[in-house]
Image: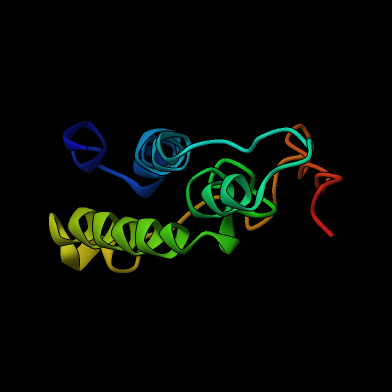
Amino acid sequence: MNKCLAKATFAEAWPCIEAQPHGGGHGGVGGEVSGTQMKREECMRWLMNEQMVNPVSSPGDPLFYLHHTWLDKVWADWQARNKTQRIKEIGGTNVMPDNQPFPARPSNIP
């Protein structure tokens, strides 16, 4: 976190935050199981703990919102280090690069 918060510009800070605190939070919670038949208990465990790494279904996990709220705090902490400048600073595009297509929805998600 300190490495990301020490970045001087949005163009430097954002990739740092995206790579570790953001991606690491999703990955640290867990990934999805394969499309096998699951017992009810397994299904509930999957829903509660293991869908955070899937960009399509992760918003279905309540932890998604806690995680992204924390990222809002990280962003505010970065801005607070030079609020006059950083409250207005932004950069980059608002579309995903062509070399990073959005993954297809998994077959086990209706």
Q: How many marks?
A: 0
Q: Residue at x 21, y 42 (%)?
A: 5
Look at 18% across and 67% down and name the residue there. 84
Which of 5/47 is in front? 47
Residue 95: give x, y in percent of width and height: 69, 54
Q: Which quarter of the figure has residue 77?
A: bottom left
Choose between 91 and 28: the one closer to the eye: 28
Q: Front-most of 83 and 21?
A: 21
Instruction: Give the left or right position of residue 78, taking residue 12 as reference.
Output: left
Q: Quadrant of the N terminus?
A: top left
Question: What colouring style does the render use?
Answer: rainbow
Where is residue 73? Give x, y as percent: 25, 61
Q: Quadrant of residue 71?
A: bottom left
Q: Name above or below for residue 64 compared with residue 46.
A: below
Residue occupying the point 43% across, 65% down: 65
Q: Looking at the figure, which quarter contains the C terminus?
A: bottom right
Q: For the view shown, which residue lies furthest in the left direction? A: 81
Query: At 81% across and 44% down in the image, what residue appears?
Result: 106
Residue 67 position, x and y percent, is 37, 56
**For residue 44, side relative to residue 65 (left or right):** right
Residue 14: percent from left, percent from top = 41, 45
- Residue 110, compared with residue 37, is above or below; it is below
Q: Quadrant of residue 59?
A: bottom right
In the displayed structure, 3 sits above or below 52; it is above
